[in-house]
């Protein structure tokens, strides 16, 4: 597809490119397997000598079309879908790490990512150092070790809404010859392209705004193709030395800029599974078609809601990077001048008890674990998504015990504000 197209056009037109007489809409290839005339042909596919489909755990045409669309939106060279955002995070790191290695992670990442990198991957022998994303570069620098293999952070942290200084993190990672992996779920490629600012790999929980309707759990990994793995063969042996499980293929030699995604697909997906179902990829594609329109409205509604809350006498504090009073306003203007996301966090003067009371009184907004879909929803992270963390970890993650996370949906702004107003009027 023509690189000059705007994102709105890519969202509609990219991915599935029907030929004469083919379906206009992306078909769901609901098939585990693909047929070949000769065993030799099939053998060549298994050896990665030819590209083609043979088993949906490795690749599926529906999934590939959707991955290609997200790849283009991010400005990458290759992408893959995964069964969930968690799987995307896991594969993005595990693709370049093994037992004995070390990663650096921003303290404010999503609770599931925090758990994965600090607990589960630790059991696999991969150590993780947690850093304050707002710390000066000299401070973060101290976390790098000779066996560090990547740095992981979120464009806009869930739920702390910390805006990442992507350039600072990219510079630090590159000075230590490792890639920066950025989870771009909250900003989406509509509001931010981390590759433009130096990130090397982007991950997504497509479950959120990309799907946009809370229908399907999914994830995606996109490679910018910019990180030169072959310059550091000792650091990245998995990419730069022969893979015995693929007849001695060296990914960087054979696949060049597509090495990272090819390895993640043909090795990790083959061995660990976690594919996105073609049905879910189809739903994701429908969501992507309207992503630019929806992001614009999410951001508009969130801005109005944040301003309403900030002016309310019962509200103690509001955190939204679109507010001029916000400590991340300048960074948000730099990296996301057209808007950040639809998620706001706030606390009430009445504290944790008032928060619970207010949430129970909401009529339009519902209490759900989810964020970032069409329906306005609320959550109390300290009691829900982050309940595995102690008070110290909650503080480090930027999650105050009284924090209410409000995911502003696409309903009319007057109705969203009226609902908050009536719920607030009932509490101390
Ligand atoms: N990354 C971020 C920023 C998230 O908010 C989430 C889920 O909330 C994930 C990753 C994990 O994604 P999933 O729930 O699709 O596994």
Image: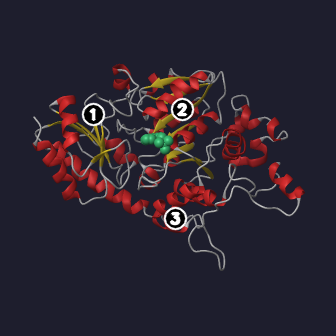
Residue 10 got which mark? 3
Residue at the spot x=68%, y=40% of the render? Answer: 268
Residue at the spot x=66%, y=46% of the render? Answer: 261
Residue highlighted by disc 1:
403
Residue highlighted by disc 2:
151
Find out if the beta carbon at label 2 lies less than 8 Å from the nearest ligand 1 atom.
no
Look at the image and tell me whether residue 407 can be seen: no
Q: Is residue 417 left or right of residue 235?
A: left
Secondary structure category for the residue under label 1 = loop
- Up-down: is 6 above or below 111? below
**Which of the two discs, 3 and 1, sits closer to the camera?**
1
Find out if the beta carbon at label 1 lies less than 8 Å from the nearest ligand 1 atom.
no
Q: Quadrant of residue 312?
A: top left
- The residue carrying pointer 3 sits among few (fewer than 14), some (14 to 19) or many (20 or more) residues within 10 Å by Cα, namely many
Quadrant of the snapshot with the N terminus:
bottom right
Mark 1 vs mark 2, CA separation in Å: 27 Å
**Which of the two discs, 1 and 2, sits closer to the camera?**
1
Report x, y in % for residue 165. Answer: 42, 38
Q: Nearer the viewer, residue 383 or 168?
A: 383
Look at the image and tell me whether residue 317 can be seen: yes
Q: Earlier in the sequence, mark 3 or mark 1?
A: 3
Considering every residue shown, the one lying at the far bottom of the view is: 21
């Amino acid at each position: 597809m023509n690189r000059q197209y705007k994102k709105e056009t890519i969202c509609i037109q990219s991915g599935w490119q029907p030929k004469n007489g083919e379906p206009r809409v992306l078909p769901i290839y609901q098939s585990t397997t693909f047929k070949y005339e000769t065993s030799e042909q099939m053998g060549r596919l298994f050896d990665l000598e030819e590209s083609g489909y043979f088993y949906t755990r490795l690749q599926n045409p529906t999934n590939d079309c959707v991955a290609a669309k997200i790849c283009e939106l991010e400005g990458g060279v290759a992408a893959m879908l995964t069964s969930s955002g968690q799987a995307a995070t896991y594969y993005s790191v595990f693709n370049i790490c093994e037992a004995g290695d070390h990663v650096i992670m921003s303290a404010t990442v999503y609770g599931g990512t925090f758990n994965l990198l600090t607990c589960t991957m630790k059991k696999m022998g991969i150590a993780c150092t947690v850093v304050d994303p707002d710390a000066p570069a000299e401070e973060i620098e101290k976390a790098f070790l000779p066996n560090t293999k990547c740095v992981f952070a979120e464009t806009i942290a869930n739920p702390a809404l910390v805006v990442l200084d992507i350039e600072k993190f990219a510079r630090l990672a590159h000075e230590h010859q490792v890639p920066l992996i950025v989870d771009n779920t909250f900003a989406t490629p509509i509001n931010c392209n981390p590759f433009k600012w130096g990130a090397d790999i982007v991950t997504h929980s497509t479950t959120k705004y990309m799907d946009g309707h809370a229908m399907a759990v999914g994830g995606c990994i996109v490679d910018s193709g910019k990180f030169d793995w072959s310059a550091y063969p000792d650091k990245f042996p998995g990419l730069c030395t022969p893979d015995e499980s693929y007849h001695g293929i060296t990914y960087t030699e054979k696949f060049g800029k597509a090495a990272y995604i090819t390895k993640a697909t043909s090795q990790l997906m083959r061995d660990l599974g976690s594919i996105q179902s073609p049905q879910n990829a189809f739903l994701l594609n429908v969501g992507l078609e309207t992503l630019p329109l929806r992001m614009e409205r999410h951001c508009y509604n969130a801005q109005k809601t944040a301003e309403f809350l900030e002016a309310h006498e019962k509200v103690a504090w509001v955190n939204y990077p679109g507010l001029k009073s916000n400590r991340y306003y300048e960074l948000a203007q730099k990296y996301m001048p057209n808007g950040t996301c639809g998620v706001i966090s706030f606390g009430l003067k009445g504290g944790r008890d008032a928060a619970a009371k207010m949430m129970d009184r909401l009529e339009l907004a519902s209490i759900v674990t989810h964020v970032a879909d069409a329906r306005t929803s609320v959550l109390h992270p300290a009691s829900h998504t982050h309940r595995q963390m102690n008070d110290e970890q909650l503080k480090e993650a930027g999650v105050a015990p009284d924090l209410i996370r409000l995911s502003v949906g696409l309903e009319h702004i007057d109705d969203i504000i009226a609902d908050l107003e009536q719920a607030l009027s009932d509490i101390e």
